[in-house]
Amino acid sequence: MHQPEIRRARRSIAAVFAVHGAQSGSFATRIPWIKAHLHLSTGELGIALMAPAIGSSLAMPLAGRLVHARGHRSAVRLLLLLCCASLVLPVLAPDLPVLVLSLLLSGAAAGTADVAMNAQGVEVEQRHGRSIMSGLHGMWSVGCLAASGVGVAAIALHMDARLDLAVVAAVLIALGAVACRGLLDVHPEPESEAPPRFALPPRSALAIGMVGFCAVFAEGASGDWSGVYLHGVAGSSATVAACSYTVFACMMALSRLFGDAAVRRLGAVAAVRLGGLVALAGGVLVVVARNPAPAIAGFALLGIGIAVVVPLCFAAAGRSGDNPSRSIAGVATVTYTSGLLAPATIGWVAQGTSLPVSFGVVTVLTLGLVLGAGVLAPPAPVSTPTSTLASTPASTLAADSNSHSNMASDSTPGATAGRAHAS
């Protein structure tokens, strides 16, 4: 495949990640409006906000089948369209049961789109020959932050949430359609076996998924509880407490955007181990902090430390097993289930003990990044024994070399399920 086509695919999948992130960021700004509009209690809102993660976890295993049936480009285009269109469902809900149902559907669309676009990202990375997954997830964070800024502006202008999200959804659908044009059109070989309709994570994906689980647990805990921690434990003002998540999210986004350079220089395993040590230091700082400055610094270090873990987990999943799409779906299911469990677990532990003890649990889990990083190592290249080479005629070696060279583009390890090929 020509390099210009691969570079175009890289730009396109980066735009897809940004659009997907913008959908998430747009919804987040309107959560207070939904709570007030439906007169929900804090507990009722908490129940509703569990629905997207549940919908994602249930639907993600279906994604491998869809990618196999439709191919990468078509699957990403369809699922991204559904993801963006579902943005308007929650603000149209008349009561709590319909809100929960709409968030289940929105989560399912976002989760399956997440799997499909990560499968395309892994494919582009392997054809490009350089690490790009961290940067792609960085673009997701950029899209999320940009959309949340637009949402804040719309709120300041007193724009009705239903009109706001309808306009945003239409814009994101258009941007997503344009972005998908440059994606690689990857299809499985006709004789390859389709994955099951509902595929549980393969064993090869479980260890990878558990590394991602540790990172997403720290992300979910920091995202939902950093402000509460700053205000209740470190004694900050409400304004400073609100800034804690912004610092955490910005540091994670910046680290992802520049993370590919670190991965290329250090390798995936060393990058995750180093990140784990940084996150461990951040967790310890949060646990012992009783003033705002060290607590915010601790959350910033947590954001830096976990930034590249999930992208590298998806990249490793694309190299594992016989069906990369199924492996990516399995890793996504295990990893994102952590996001469902983390906020509630922190609350339960804090209720029985204290918030510092809760973040002690987060700190211990960051050790999983250090200890488990080895499962993200790329497979060792197969080498021909020296004795065999010595006994092989030079003309045969030359012919084999030419043959392997010509086949290289068709035998890329992550070319999706069953020796996929791009047209």
Image (cartoon, helix red, strand yellow):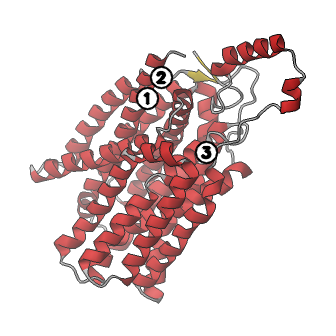
Residue at image x 39%, y 34%?
Answer: 14
Quadrant housing the C terminus: top right
| Above-or-below relation of 105 to 130 | below
Determine whether, in the image, residue 195 is placed left or right of residue 236.
right
Q: Position of residue 290 (x, y in %)?
A: 30, 85
Q: Residue at x 55, y 49 (%)?
A: 268
**Is there a contact, CB below 8 Å, between mark 2 and mark 1?**
yes
* Place of residue 291 in the rendered image (x, y in percent of width and height, measured from the top left): 26, 82
Image coords of residue 153 (percent x, y) = 14, 49
Instruction: Calculate the distance from the C-alpha at mark 2 to the C-alpha at mark 1.
Output: 6 Å
Q: In front here: 292 or 261?
A: 261
Q: Which residue corresponds to mark 2?
A: 6
Give residue 43's quadrant in the image: bottom left
| N-term-proximal mark, 3 vs 2 | 2
Disc 2 residue type? Ile
Secondary structure at badge 2 equals: helix
